Image (cartoon, helix red, strand yellow):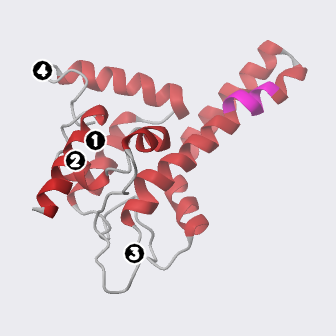
Amino acid sequence: MHGVLFKKNIYWNDFIGKIMLFCYAALPYDQLFLMHQRHHHNPTGSADPDFPNSPSDGLFSWYKQFMFSYLGTSQMLSLISIWCLLALILGPNSIYNILLFCILPLFLSSFQLFIFGTYLPHRKLHSNLDTHTRSIDLPVWLSLLACYHFGYHQEHHDHPTLSWFELPAARKRSRLLAIG
């Protein structure tokens, strides 16, 4: 969505993005691209699709709103159709495999993305803090495991054209600037 895969060819960025988002959760790239741009232009503002209607919403209420803003009816119908087709092809005993290898990973990865890419970087911790964007102070190895450095969120917002693997160096530079 930031043109980092093929920096000189937006067509291939968008094409691969469309395929990956469809494979992940039947998500429409063009719609998500616009939502992501709205998030970047006004993080935690009223137009930010990632931010809750009520900033005092708890973790699960916020996650529910986050999921419903990205997984609309057409995406849910697509996913259910794909899972039903898999069950027909693989047989009735395959429902546990579909739950274990399709539905559970989608749920867990969406929750991981929400926690490390939205909730922790954008939640309001104290009434005197703004809620725009901040990074989670994790060691590089843990940041990678948490969600491909999505926790280095301030750096992502400051430098959206950096690839995920370039965010630790940007985080290190921003920490050095803050110290000195």
- Report, in whole angstroms, how far the alpha carbon at label 2 lies from the one at label 1: 6 Å
Q: Nearer the viewer, residue 24 or 172?
A: 172
Provide residue 58's location: percent of width, then percent of height: 56, 73
Give residue 129's quadrant in the image: bottom left
The three-letter code of the residue at mark 3 reads Lys
Q: In terms of sequence position, does the residue under pointer 2 or pointer 3 come before the other?
A: 3
What range of the chain is rendered magenta? 97-102
**Disc on res. 94:** none
Give the residue displayed 44% in from the left and 61% down from the top. 120
Q: Mark 4 points at which residue?
A: 8
48 up-or-down from 107: above or below: below
- Report, in whole angstroms, how far the alpha carbon at label 2 lies from the one at label 3: 24 Å
Q: In which quarter of the image is the C terminus?
A: bottom left
Q: In terms of sequence position, does the residue under pointer 4 or pointer 3 come before the other?
A: 4
Is the residue marked by circle 4 packed among few (<14), some (14-19), or many (20+) residues within 10 Å? few
Q: Mark 1 points at which residue?
A: 168
Give the residue displayed 32% in from the left and 72% down from the top. 131
Provide residue 27's location: percent of width, then percent of height: 47, 36
Q: Nearer the viewer, residue 87 or 159?
A: 159
- Report, in whole angstroms, how far the alpha carbon at label 4 lies from the one at label 3: 38 Å
Q: Name the residue under label 3.
A: 124
9 up-or-down from 115: above or below: above
- Report, in whole angstroms, how far the alpha carbon at label 4 lies from the one at label 2: 27 Å
Q: Classify mark 2: helix, strand or loop.
A: helix
Q: Classify mark 1: helix, strand or loop.
A: helix
The three-letter code of the residue at mark 1 reads Pro
Q: Do the residues labelled 2 and 1 touch (CB within 8 Å)?
A: yes
The three-letter code of the residue at mark 2 reads Lys
Provide residue 75's location: percent of width, then percent of height: 55, 39
- Report, in whole angstroms, how far the alpha carbon at label 1 lies from the one at label 4: 23 Å
Magenta region's main secondary structure? helix
